[in-house]
């Protein structure tokens, strides 16, 4: 997404009062680079090379700031761990690679 702040703002405008927004993204950390780009694209070949651009990964603090600027309140952030052998994902307290966030528009 070239302008994630604009996407969050557009989503916020579309929400009804009390509505919730859920997003999933990659954290901009060395671990995310290692697992999402090197591991998934080059080693395991789960995705085509060039699928991810590290500069476009988003830190939770950045996402939270964009949500606040759009008038939303971040409710929760949860890490997501992916097991490529089982092809399953699960929620985790670790958000160094993948994470999901929930936000709410005030009533």
Image (tube, grey):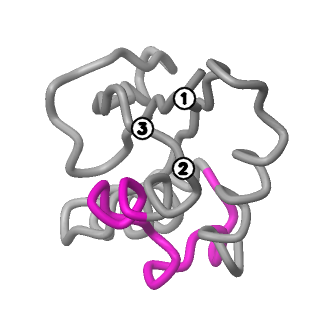
Image quadrant where residue 77 sits: top left
21 and 72: which one is in front? 72
The residue nearer to you, when weighing 48 against 100, is: 100
Q: Report how far apart the C-alphas of labels 3 and 2 lie in the structure.
A: 7 Å
Position of 49 relative to 61 (above/below): below
The reply to whether the C-beta atoms of the residues labelled 2 and 1 are less than 8 Å apart is yes
Q: Residue at x 23, y 41 (%)?
A: 95
Horizontally, is 61 left or right of 23 in the view?
Answer: left
At numbered mark 3, what does the secondary structure look like: helix, strand or loop? strand
Q: Which image quadrant: the C terminus?
A: top right
Which residue is at a point 67% across and 21% down the rendered structure image?
19
In the displayed structure, 40 sits above or below 42; it is above
Quadrant holding the N terminus: bottom right
Report which quarter residue 60 is drawn in: bottom left
- 14 sits to left or right of 105: right
Labels in figure, total:
3
Out of 38 and 73, give the one closest to the viewer: 73
Mark 1, secondary structure of its residue: loop
| Mark number, residue 71 | 2
Q: Position of residue 86 (x, y in %)?
A: 44, 15
The reply to whether the magenta stretch includes residue 99 is no
Q: Which residue is mark 1?
A: 106
- Answer yes or no: do the residues labelled 1 and 3 have beta carbons within 8 Å? yes
Q: Could you tell me how far apart the alpha carbons at marks 1 and 3 are, in whole angstroms?
A: 8 Å
Q: Quadrant of residue 7?
A: bottom right
- Residue 18: percent from the left, percent from the top? 62, 18
Residue carrying label 3: 73
Q: Which residues are magenta?
A: 47-65
SS at badge 2: loop
Residue at the spot 53% in from the left edge and 40% down from the top edge: 24
Whether the residues at callouts 3 and 2 have beta carbons within 8 Å, the answer is: no
Spot occupied by residue 89 in the image (x, y as percentages of width and height)? 43, 20
């Amino acid at each position: 997404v070239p302008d994630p702040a604009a996407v969050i703002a557009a989503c916020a405008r579309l929400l009804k009062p009390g509505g919730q927004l859920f997003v999933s993204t990659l954290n901009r950390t060395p671990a995310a680079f290692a697992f999402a780009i090197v591991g998934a694209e080059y080693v395991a070949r789960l995705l085509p090379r060039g699928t991810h651009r590290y500069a476009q990964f988003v830190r939770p603090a950045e996402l939270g700031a964009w949500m606040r600027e759009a008038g939303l309140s971040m409710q929760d952030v949860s890490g997501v761990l992916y097991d490529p052998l089982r092809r399953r994902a699960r929620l985790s307290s670790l958000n160094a690679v993948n994470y999901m966030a929930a936000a709410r528009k005030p009533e």
